[in-house]
Amino acid sequence: MKSVSVNGRTYAAPQEPIVVVCVDGCEPAYLEEALKAGAMPWLQGAIAQGANLIGDCVVPSFTNPNNLSIVTGAPPSVHGICGNYLYDRESGQEVMMNDPKFLRAETILAAFAREGAKVAVVTAKDKLRLLLGKGLKGICFSAEKADQTTKAEHGIDNALAFVGRPLPSVYSADLSEFVFAAGVKLMATEHPDIMYLSTTDYIQHKHAPGTPVANDFYRMMDGYLGELEAMGCTIVFTADHGMNDKHGADGQPQVIYLQDLLDEWIGQARARVILPITDPYVVHHGALGSFATIYLPDDVDQAALIARMAALPGMELVVTRVEGCRRFELPEDRVGDLIAVSTRNFAIGTSVSKHDLSGLTVPLRSHGGMTEQQVPVIVNRKLKALPAGYRLRNFSAFDLACNYAIPAATPQRKAI
């Protein structure tokens, strides 16, 4: 197998199996607290023998932009996926950005598969599967629809029977455990050269770091990661984004309902607020995150509006499209006229009437802003020295695994 060059970066052919794990919503504090509780012996060993780093994720700190950045090794300005949701000016429609047609760059996974590598991908929710699997010749399925897989479409028939676990609820810790169980089974039986595992943040939305449920969740994944290491895998553990409380001391959500405010300030329905966190799975966050993009009519004084929005309690940043896309490396043609980001403990909504918060059985926790940008980047192998000025990102994961991780002294598998 040859090295591959993808989106301006070259990746060496793996010398041992590579597993990149994206733990959805993994605020670094979850690992710190789980380690204190003795819940992650594999992680403790990985840190001792490898690298324990903190990197930056993509802003908006949401699932789709970051997963696609990890598998392309590039920011959204290159791959085009800047949220779960966007407004198409031409059609006047708000659409989900989960169709592969929206992806503008090749993935590292597809490039390695083209060169003969065996590649496997397991993701929690099906919303990501088509994007992650674009151009990929290999195994790619979701835990959510593991009962519907076929060899022709997913590279494997009946993944549910293959894994040997019940079909999990999309709103459960079991959905993520299925991903890990599938990964271990695939490594043991199919021996992929490269594997990508991506979980869901259902637990992180509901349970803070150090709580018993959170520690149990991390204890679960630690066991599976230990099994993968025992099979000789280089493992890079990272996250798509962090997670923070978005409520006050009274437990009530702290939300800036931006559409309602703009309707009052510049006229009813003249502005359009888009929340890129929006997807079909809103029970645990009510479609409330810390990032919004705003489409405006041409006659609005943007400078004046920016000043007024920036003065709102809980607002951290309001900038123009050009400035925001430069700062956050986003594609200008898929972003509104303004970008707004709230502070650590505030979320942004559209209108009060459009957010159903009845599913919030615990105080709101969410993500999307700059305060959720720091994520763990942990490698279970020693690393060669990184170049001066190397900015560590979650989408450095495959670069670290292929180009900087030093293989085990006694490899479990022959070099490819």
Image: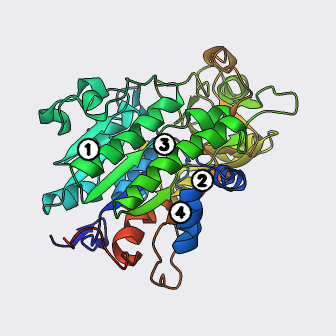
Question: Which residue is label 2 attached to?
Answer: 40
Q: Amino acid at mark 1?
A: Gly
- What secondary structure is marked by label 1? loop
Dot 1 or dot 3, earlier in sequence:
3
Question: Which residue is label 4 attached to?
Answer: 377
- What secondary structure is marked by label 4? strand
Image spot of residue 372 (x, y percent) = 64, 50
Mark whose residue sits in front, 4 or 3: 4
Dividing the picture into quadrants, the one containing residue 374 is: bottom right
- What secondary structure is marked by label 3? helix
- What secondary structure is marked by label 2? loop
Say which quadrant the N terminus sits in: bottom left
Question: Which residue is label 3 attached to?
Answer: 63
Front position in the image: 413 or 54: 413
The answer to the question of whether label 2 and label 4 lie on touching residues, with beta carbons closer than 8 A, is no
Dividing the picture into quadrants, the one containing residue 201 is: top right
Image spot of residue 154 (x, y percent) = 20, 36
Spatial separation of the CA atoms under disc 4 and disc 3: 16 Å
Say which quadrant the C terminus sits in: bottom left
| Circle count | 4
Q: Residues within 10 Å of mark 1 (few under 14, many from 20)?
A: many
Task: Give left or right: position of 322 versus 72.
Answer: right
Image spot of residue 164 (x, y percent) = 32, 30
Q: Residues within 10 Å of mark 4 (few under 14, many from 20)?
A: many
Front position in the image: 376 or 335: 376
Q: Residue placed at 61% from the left, 17% from the top?
A: 354
Q: Which mark is residue 133?
A: 1
Q: Amino acid at mark 3?
A: Thr
